[in-house]
């Protein structure tokens, strides 16, 4: 079944690419849109590759590399048609069939690379990183092709190239916004919120009364809408980053509290009985057994809070801030219809949040390497 599906995809890609060879007779594309040398070379190469691969002569990384080369050539031709040959805003069926051919090559190539398995951890890690990277680049190209090909107004959805140009040209503004929102508000609020949540969880575990009284209250507070908390924090702590850090503390405190309390209860009864048989007290059992067992829960809260903190700080800046910050920039640039700058801020926030989450995941891997979820299966 899999083999038949692969052959069907290759045949469909071949037919779609071949559709580009008939723009004049079909009247699908104006003559000025059609660059004969580039398109003809790509169609011929892609047809030859499809015919060869249909015979099953390439597998794994070899197949992925060959189809990746074909896809890159196709992307270059498609961008040439969009920008240099005048297809922007007027692309018709032939162009989208051509994009479909590239999509088939990308799909089959990524699937071939993703199926590769190696006992070499470095090589396997590189392949695991290559698959999402290739898929992400394909989505960026598809975004570019759709917005330019259909002539989408820039105020509705700018192209990735336009966003990249604005990002590169506004590094000083983006750096100032990053420092105000992420470095000052997010990091300080994250440390205070997670740290206090962890310490209170130890107190709750030590005093059972607090577990019955504080945890229900924590669930209530964690359900409060951020748009209601943020204006109050601005009134209490002022318009600078301190009020945003206060919002971050509120958003990160209770996830850490609830997860840590649950993690401290994760140690098995047999392990606890063994510690008691050794004469271990509460604090010895806590540090030797229960906290190590709670680490997966604690890092789960840290990873969740890494994204919640950034969201909370950005939203809080909508309700009052100095003339700097990610949330301030987004709200003001939307009013000025500078949507490319808004997307540049969104890209920076996404990169910062992803890096923050990745840092927590790396720390988790180093601390909880013993957990079954990290055992390698070959």
Image (tube, rainbow, N blue to C red):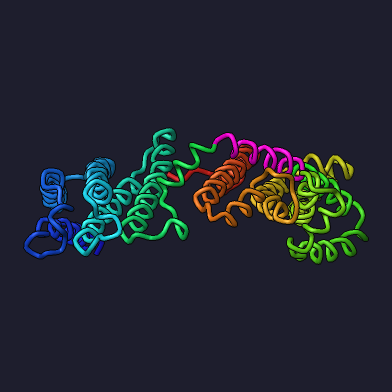
Percent across and percent down for residue 255 are: 74, 55
Q: The N terminus appears in which quarter of the rendering?
A: bottom left
From the viewer's perspective, tell me whether residue 305 is left or right of residue 224. Answer: left
Q: The C terminus appears in which quarter of the rendering?
A: top left
Above or below, 7 against 56 in this view is: below
Is 78 within the magenta?
no
Q: State the predominant SS element of the stretch in magenta.
A: helix
The reply to whether residue 72 is in sight is yes
Q: Name the residue located 46 percent from the left edge and 46 percent from the top edge.
A: 163
The reply to whether residue 297 is in sight is no
Q: Nearer the viewer, residue 360 or 29?
A: 29
From the viewer's perspective, tell me whether residue 139 is left or right of residue 367. Answer: left
Q: Name the residue located 53 percent from the left edge and 48 percent from the top edge.
A: 341
Percent across and percent down for residue 14 are: 15, 57
Q: Residue furthest front?
A: 336
Q: Name the residue located 55 percent from the left edge and 35 percent from the top edge.
A: 171
Q: Name the residue located 79 percent from the left edge and 48 percent from the top edge.
A: 239
From the viewer's perspective, tell me whether residue 54 is left or right of residue 257. Answer: left
The number of callouts visible is 0
Q: What's drawn in magenta, residue-wise? A: 171-189
Above or below, 92 against 359 in this view is: below
Is 176 within the magenta?
yes
Locate residue 15: give its quadrant: bottom left
Percent across and percent down for residue 237 are: 85, 49
């Amino acid at each position: 079944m899999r083999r038949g599906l692969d052959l069907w995809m290759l045949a469909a890609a071949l037919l779609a690419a071949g559709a580009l060879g008939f723009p004049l007779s079909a009247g699908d594309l104006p003559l000025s849109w059609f660059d004969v040398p580039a398109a003809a070379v790509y169609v011929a190469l892609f047809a030859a590759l499809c015919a060869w691969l249909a015979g099953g002569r390439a597998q794994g990384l070899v197949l992925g590399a060959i189809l990746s080369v074909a896809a890159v050539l196709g992307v270059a031709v498609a961008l040439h048609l969009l920008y240099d040959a005048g297809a922007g805003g007027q692309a018709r069926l032939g162009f989208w069939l051509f994009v479909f051919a590239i999509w088939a090559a990308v799909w089959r190539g990524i699937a071939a690379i993703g199926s590769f398995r190696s006992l070499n951890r470095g090589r396997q890690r590189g392949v695991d990183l290559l698959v999402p990277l290739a898929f992400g680049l394909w989505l960026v190209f598809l975004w570019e092709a759709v917005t330019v090909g259909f002539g989408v107004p820039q105020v509705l959805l700018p192209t990735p190239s336009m966003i990249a140009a604005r990002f590169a040209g506004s590094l000083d503004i983006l750096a100032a916004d990053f420092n105000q929102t992420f470095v000052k508000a997010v990091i300080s609020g994250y440390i205070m919120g997670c740290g206090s949540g962890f310490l209170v969880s130890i107190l709750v575990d030590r005093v059972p009364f607090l577990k019955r009284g504080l945890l229900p209250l924590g669930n209530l507070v964690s359900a409060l809408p951020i748009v209601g908390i943020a204006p109050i924090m601005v009134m209490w702590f002022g318009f600078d980053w301190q009020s945003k850090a206060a919002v971050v503390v509120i958003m990160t405190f209770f996830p850490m509290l609830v997860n840590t309390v649950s993690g401290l209860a994760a140690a098995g009864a047999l392990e606890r009985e063994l510690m008691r048989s050794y004469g271990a007290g509460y604090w010895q059992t806590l540090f030797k057994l229960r906290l190590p067992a709670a680490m997966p829960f604690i890092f789960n809260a840290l990873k969740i809070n890494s994204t919640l903190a950034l969201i909370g700080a950005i939203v809080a800046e909508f309700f009052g801030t100095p003339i700097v910050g990610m949330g301030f920039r987004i709200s003001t640039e939307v009013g000025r219809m500078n949507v490319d700058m808004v997307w540049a801020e969104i890209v920076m926030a996404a990169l910062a949040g992803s890096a923050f989450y990745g840092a927590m995941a790396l720390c988790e891997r180093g601390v909880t390497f013993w957990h079954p979820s990290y055992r390698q299966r070959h």
